[in-house]
């Protein structure tokens, strides 16, 4: 298919493996879905320690379920990415392990205390869900189908995150203070979740033209802020003074971009941020540690010389 | 040889199982499936799959989703007074529906 035809036909779930898609489309879609898949895996690794550190049995169960879900989302997405024929699942997992695979800014930061879990599970997952809901209308059908299942499961994650936040913000004064403190640390990172503004976004135009992306970074960020600023305030969180955010007359928000640390963001985007390397290498080590499990699996039907199976975790 | 048939109504939909056909090979299976299953109902695409290639696991052999109470993994468990984002409400609605179908609610 010619690229002009792709742009002309672009619409929700328009293209599938049955269509001959141009390389430019397949590469753009692979980059986007691989990034998404990697983020699911790295997010799961960030939260995994809190299965052990959860303060109650209910939270422990919920966290083990959530981490399991996220790893599953990664698996679904690697399948959707693989269906484009640009990279194999094994190549994507190897790239993630060796520091070449890109993933969401928020998951490059270490998470140390329990109150931080609410930042990820309520705000970051809330932001992710907002974005994922729009991706159910992406033009690559396998990606849209993966989003159907992800969106089905994700409501639990956000509501569980909210439940943690509610518990902390109605808890002791100390708990409330700790929560406010981590909120101030995470808030700018959460705003950066949506990436640079449209005028600075490298890949937006093409992805939008071919229907891969259905909403721009700015729109998504706006929708997120409109939805989640009041929720944060309802739980008694104070929105930090910086970045300065001003509500326009039409209800949308203007964020003072200069108040956000874009140097750090782009360092992260290149996988060069020091704490983020810790996250990447941590997963690599964990994967090595369970190599013996993969080795014990017998793959009877694998053809001679076929790629060795590799689990995402 | 039996071939299971999956029909997709519209571009972008899921291929869902709709029946099977007898056919000596894949080409004939496609032709028969097109005639038997895609002639009257709106169809964008069909898949044919050799029956022998399908693995099945049913509820008699396993307990899907386990046997213990897993309410902790459902959104409706977490009560709140908040007006949620529409995508969270959608997800919760779908989960409530699935819970009902499983007989858990």
Image (cartoon, rainbow, N blue to C red):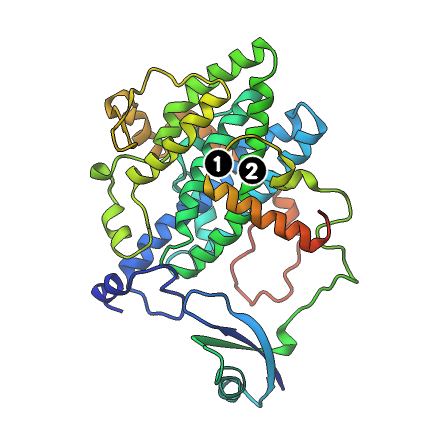
Image position of A172 with respect to B97: above or below? above
| A274 and A135: which is toward the camera | A135
Residue furthest top as drawn: A173
User: Which element is circle 2 on?
Assistant: helix
Residue displayed at 62% across by 67% down = A301
Contact flag, marks 1 and 2 (Cβ < 8 Å): yes
**x, y (%) of residue A254?**
26, 28
Residue shown at the point (37%, 32%) measured from the top left: A226
Task: Name the quarter where the C terminus of chain A is drawn.
Answer: top right
Instruction: Report the residue at 51% width, 89% height from top.
Output: B28
Marks 1 and 2 sit apart, C-alpha to C-alpha, by 7 Å
In the rendered image, which residue does mark 2 sit on? A157
Residue A51, by quadrant, is: top right
How many marks are shown on the rendered structure?
Answer: 2
Residue on which disc 1 sits: A125
Q: Is residue A16 above or below residue A214?
A: below
- Name the image quarter holding the N terminus of chain A: bottom left
Percent position of residue B65, x then y = 70, 51
Pinpoint the chain carrying mark 1: A
């Amino acid at each position: 298919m010619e690229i002009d035809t792709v742009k002309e036909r672009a619409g929700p779930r328009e293209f599938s493996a049955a269509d001959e898609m141009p390389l430019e489309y397949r590469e753009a879609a692979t980059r986007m879905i691989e990034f998404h898949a990697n983020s699911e895996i790295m997010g799961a690794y960030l939260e995994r320690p809190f299965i052990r550190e959860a303060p109650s049995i209910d939270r422990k169960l919920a966290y083990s379920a959530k981490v399991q879900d996220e790893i599953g989302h990664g698996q679904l997405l690697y399948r959707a990415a693989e269906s484009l024929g640009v990279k194999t699942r094994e190549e994507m997992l190897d790239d993630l392990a060796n520091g070449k695979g890109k993933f969401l800014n928020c998951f490059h930061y270490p998470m140390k205390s329990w109150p931080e879990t609410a930042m990820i599970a309520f705000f970051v997952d809330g932001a992710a869900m907002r974005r994922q809901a729009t991706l159910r209308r992406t033009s690559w059908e396998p990606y849209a189908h993966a989003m159907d299942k992800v969106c089905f499961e994700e409501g639990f994650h956000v509501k569980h995150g909210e439940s943690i936040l509610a518990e902390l913000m109605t808890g002791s004064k100390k708990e409330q203070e700790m929560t406010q403190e981590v909120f101030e640390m995470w808030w700018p990172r959460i705003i950066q979740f949506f990436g640079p503004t449209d005028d600075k976004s490298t890949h937006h135009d093409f992805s939008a033209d071919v229907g891969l992306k259905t909403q721009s970074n700015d729109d998504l960020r706006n929708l997120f802020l409109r939805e989640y600023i009041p929720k944060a305030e309802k739980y008694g969180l104070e929105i930090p003074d910086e970045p300065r955010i001003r509500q326009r007359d039409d209800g949308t928000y203007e964020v003072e971009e200069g108040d956000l640390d874009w140097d750090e963001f782009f360092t992260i985007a290149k996988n060069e941020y020091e704490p983020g390397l810790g996250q990447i290498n941590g997963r690599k080590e964990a994967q090595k540690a369970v190599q013996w499990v993969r080795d014990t699996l017998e793959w009877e039907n694998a053809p001679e010389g076929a790629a060795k199976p590799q689990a995402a975790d | 040889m039996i071939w299971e048939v999956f029909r997709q109504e519209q571009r972008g939909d899921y291929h869902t199982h709709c029946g099977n056909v007898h056919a000596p090979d894949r080409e004939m299976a496609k032709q028969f499936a097109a005639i038997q299953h895609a002639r009257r109902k709106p169809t964008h695409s069909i898949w044919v799959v050799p029956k022998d290639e399908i693995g099945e696991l049913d509820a008699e052999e396993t307990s899907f989703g386990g046997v213990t109470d897993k309410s902790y993994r459902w959104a409706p468990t977490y009560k709140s007074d908040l007006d949620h984002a529409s995508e969270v409400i959608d997800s919760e609605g779908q989960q409530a529906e699935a819970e009902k179908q499983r007989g858990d609610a």
